[in-house]
Image (cartoon, helix red, strand yellow):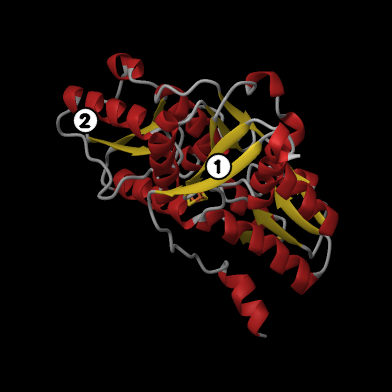
Amino acid sequence: MSADKPALSILLCSPRGFCAGVVRAIDAVEQALKIYGPPVYVRHEIVHNKYVVENLKAKGAVFVEELDEVPATQAPVIFSAHGVAKSVPAAAKVRNLFAIDATCPLVTKVHREAEIHFKRGRHIVLVGHRGHPEVIGTMGQLPDGTVTLIEAVGDVTTLAVPGEGGLAYVTQTTLSLDDTREIVEALKTRFPDIVGPHKEDICYATTNRQEAVKVVAPQVDAMIVVGSPNSSNSQRLREVAERAGCTPAVLIQRAADIDWSLFGAISALGIAAGASAPEVLVEEIIDAFAARYAITVETVSTADESVFFPLPRDLREAALS
Ligand code: SF4
């Protein structure tokens, strides 16, 4: 009975949810299942979302962390959207595995930039989060010792780099825009000749989702970011909301995870979703609020997105034959 429920205005951030790289990676697994049948092996979570992974598992995808968990097989082995070190396709080749690379083209762009800097004799500074699969993949494009990882502005002061040959930087694609700007400024101050990317490495999807959160966060009493705890871009959205003065700002995977004690007396709620979070989970969370509040939903759109990446070539060609 809506008359008994408190009013709640929900502002939906747009763009939100799936980016072109995530759509391509999920489509790659689904197409491979359709063309070759199960099992299809996937190295690492294809994208950082449990719901997506469980759905693909139910269709016959088998997720592994490393290639040595894959038996001798003719079945496809798909590399995730985050990208892999060069040693991974090399190991797949040695084992005669049928590898399909679903690395997002915008991650591949960073790999190629790093390679070009290396060929030009530059030492490379990678701005990113230690241990994230994308960072492991980018560092693994080049020999050990040629890429130095930094995570925060404080690391610039203590950064020790080889004295000759020039210096370049690249970044992870899913970082905080503001933090990265600060780190890059510090790098340029300390190393005025450092070479950077022509176009930022932080991708369009990360940029657009953070900008939308920046606009919505000051207008609401609380913000929910739909996404997984291991999703870097989702974690950054939560931080962006918090820095814009919106507390609580929480990262939630499913409606069942909502801690209702945080949302008691609010009258306006913002909802955003990381690049690997499906829209169905946003809807589930809106439905959960609709059960407790008399909601109105308004979309706040800060950018249009029309980016599309075609499937990996093997799958395109197999679909045509
Ligand atoms: S978040 Fe950006 S880099 Fe990552 S998969 Fe999506 S488009 Fe590609």
Look at the picture and state if 129 lies above or below 226: above
- Looking at the picture, how far across and down is residue 175, in whole percent? 43, 35
Q: Amino acid at mark 2?
A: Glu
Mark 2 → mark 1, Cα distance in angstroms:
40 Å
Q: Residue at x 61, y 71 (%)?
A: 314
* Residue matched to label 1: 274
- Looking at the picture, how far across and down is residue 48, in whole percent? 64, 42
* Mark 2 or 1, nearer chain start: 2
Q: Secondary structure at mark 1?
A: loop
* 83 lies left or right of 124: right
Circles 2, 1 touching at the beta carbon (< 8 Å): no
Location of the C terminus by quadrant is bottom right
* 315 lies left or right of 243: right
The residue carrying pointer 1 sits among few (fewer than 14), some (14 to 19) or many (20 or more) residues within 10 Å by Cα, namely many
Residue 209 lies in quadrant: top left
Q: Nearer the viewer, residue 116 or 16?
A: 16
Q: Secondary structure at mark 2?
A: loop
Q: Residue at x 47, y 57 (%)?
A: 105
Q: Residue at x 42, y 32 (%)?
A: 219
Residue 231 lies in quadrant: top right
- Looking at the picture, how far across and down is residue 1, in whole percent? 76, 39
- Looking at the picture, how far across and down is residue 60, in whole percent? 83, 58
The residue carrying pointer 2 sits among few (fewer than 14), some (14 to 19) or many (20 or more) residues within 10 Å by Cα, namely few
* Residue matched to label 2: 164
